[in-house]
């Protein structure tokens, strides 16, 4: 088992120093939250100038930044509609799930693209983990709208930037054929997370559940070529 180093982002200088330290062990990927960065007096924008050295180092090192679902700090949104006290991971209302499900990940990548992260760092590779793919069509629709409303702002179309730089991992209940061209086969990854809810008892069941509509060549790409490509691994 090869664990993935977690890089806290609360302090930009500390994040850079920690990334530089873990790179000495030659990881193929690092991980962090796809969420705003909380600080005592509010939040820090993870793509601001203060984090530029971090993203530049990740690009230079060629390491994949895998963003993972977690505490997304979105309880403030729930409190606007349903004020019930502190957030709890055990007792969550149905409304909380409706308001926040897969919202943070879409907002994270929207922020990255609208702040032109991939235009500044064209070698960056990011991977969305444990978020599924259901949020992607809505994100791309909103990015299409932004490109239309702000002609000339994006050097490259934001939909293309997302497709080139972000690999995604579907959940077992995601039916890939229903997403059409919004989810690129050459950016799909498979993962098994049993006994967590995102996995299946037998990992191969994931293929039938989520990827059953893919032909042999596309399935081979998802199960073999895509992970090697995103991790930049060459088999001898």
Image: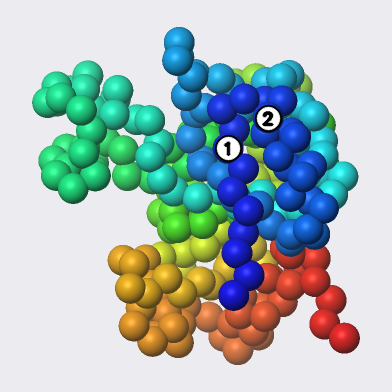
Element type at mark 1: loop
Task: Name the quadrant containing residue 58.
Answer: top right
Colour scheme of this structure image?
Answer: rainbow
Task: Say whether disc 2 or disc 1 marks the residue closer to the N-terminus.
Answer: 1
Task: Name the quadrant containing residue 85.
Answer: top left
When the figure is inspected, residue 115 is found, relative to residue 26, above or below; the finding is above
Element type at mark 2: helix
Asked if residue 74 lies left or right of residue 121, the reply is left
Residue 8 image label: 1
When the figure is inspected, residue 153 is found, relative to residue 139, above or below; the finding is above
Residue 39 place in picture, x, y as percent: 49, 19
Q: Which of 96 and 188 is in front in this view?
A: 96
Residue beneath label 2, please? 14
Category of crowding for the residue at label 2, using alpha-carbon neighbours closer than 10 angstroms: few (below 14), some (14–19), many (at least 20): some
Residue 188 image label: none
Residue 61 place in picture, x, y as percent: 84, 49
> Residue visible at 63% across and 70% down?
2
Residue 126 place in picture, x, y as percent: 66, 50
Q: In which quarter of the image is the N terminus?
A: bottom right
When the figure is inspected, residue 171 is found, relative to residue 134, above or below; the finding is below
């Amino acid at each position: 088992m090869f664990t993935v180093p977690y890089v806290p982002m609360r302090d930009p200088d500390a994040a850079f120093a920690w990334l530089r330290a873990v790179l000495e062990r030659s990881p193929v990927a690092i991980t962090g939250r796809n969420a705003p960065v909380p600080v005592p007096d509010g939040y820090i924008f993870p793509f601001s100038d203060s984090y530029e050295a971090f993203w530049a180092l990740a690009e230079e090192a060629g390491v994949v930044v895998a963003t993972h679902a977690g505490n997304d700090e979105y309880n403030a949104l729930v409190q606007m509609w349903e004020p019930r006290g502190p957030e709890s991971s055990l007792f969550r209302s149905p409304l909380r799930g409706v308001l926040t499900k897969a919202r943070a990940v879409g907002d994270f990548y929207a922020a990255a693209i609208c702040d032109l992260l991939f235009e500044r760092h064209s070698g960056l590779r990011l991977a969305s983990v444990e978020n599924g793919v259901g949020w992607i069509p809505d994100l791309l629709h909103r990015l299409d709208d932004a490109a239309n409303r702000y002609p000339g702002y994006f050097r490259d179309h934001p939909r293309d930037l997302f497709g080139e730089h972000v690999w995604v991992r579907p959940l077992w209940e995601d039916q890939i054929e229903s997403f059409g061209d919004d989810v690129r086969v050459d950016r799909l990854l498979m993962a098994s997370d049993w006994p967590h809810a995102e996995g299946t008892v037998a990992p191969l069941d994931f293929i039938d559940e989520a990827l059953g509509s893919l032909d042999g060549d596309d399935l081979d790409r998802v199960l073999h070529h895509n992970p090697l490509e995103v991790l930049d691994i060459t088999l001898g």
